[in-house]
Amino acid sequence: MLVTVKMVFAPVPTAGLALVLGAPAGAVVVVRAAHGASVATVLLATVLLYDAAMFIVGTGAANRWEGPAAGILTIVPFTVIVASVLAPPFRGTSAWVLGAVAVVLRELDRARLAPAHAAAR
């Protein structure tokens, strides 16, 4: 006997979830369209370097602050390199602003996800 199950999706939570999951991917496209490929690449590299350092150091760390501190300390030399090498798209303090915004937004995201990680343990 074949049993069929009718799946019902609520439109508002589904649209909200699609917005939350699609906004970061869409942000890269918007940055590339507005400012060029080099700025979008720097944005992605900043996030990837932060996450890699946070994972590598924070996995075996005794304190919770060591992973995020390693991520922030990884972004600082990368921002210096970006500010000195990529001078045409980044002028003045714009590379530092991009690095600071990436750190602040990543820390806000980490703080938002902290209760979910604590509940999963």
Image (cartoon, rainbow, N blue to C red):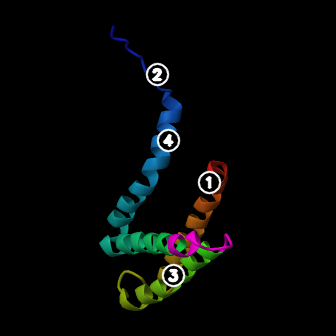
Q: Is residue 63 magenta?
A: yes
- How crowded is the residue under tag 3: few (<14 C-alpha within 10 Å), some, or many (20+)? some
Gap between marks 4 and 2 measured at Cα: 16 Å
Horizontal arrangement in the rendering, residue 93 relative to residue 4 (left or right): right
Q: What residue is disc 3 on? A: 74
- Residue 104 picture location, percent across and down: 60, 69
- How crowded is the residue under tag 2: few (<14 C-alpha within 10 Å), some, or many (20+)? few
Q: How many marks?
A: 4
Residue 17: image tag: 4
Q: What residue is disc 1 on? A: 117
- Residue 71 picture location, percent across and down: 54, 76
Gap between marks 3 and 2 measured at Cα: 45 Å
Circle 2/circle 1 CB separation < 8 Å: no
Residue 108 higher or lower than 43, as above or below: above
Q: For the residue marked with disc 4, what is the amino acid?
A: Leu
| Foreground disc of the pair 4, 2 | 2
Circle 1/circle 4 CB separation < 8 Å: no
Gap between marks 3 and 4 measured at Cα: 31 Å
Horizontal arrangement in the rendering, residue 18 relative to residue 2 (left or right): right
Q: Residue furthest top?
A: 1
Q: Nearer the viewer, residue 66 or 96?
A: 66
Q: Is residue 19 magenta?
A: no
Chain-order first, disc 1 or disc 4: 4
Q: What residue is disc 2 on? A: 8
Residue 65: image tag: none
Q: Quadrant of residue 61?
A: bottom right
Per the rendered image, the range of residues in magenta is 55-65
Q: For the residue marked with disc 1, what is the amino acid?
A: His
Circle 3/circle 4 CB separation < 8 Å: no
Gap between marks 1 and 3 measured at Cα: 24 Å
Residue at screen point 43% across, 21% down: 7
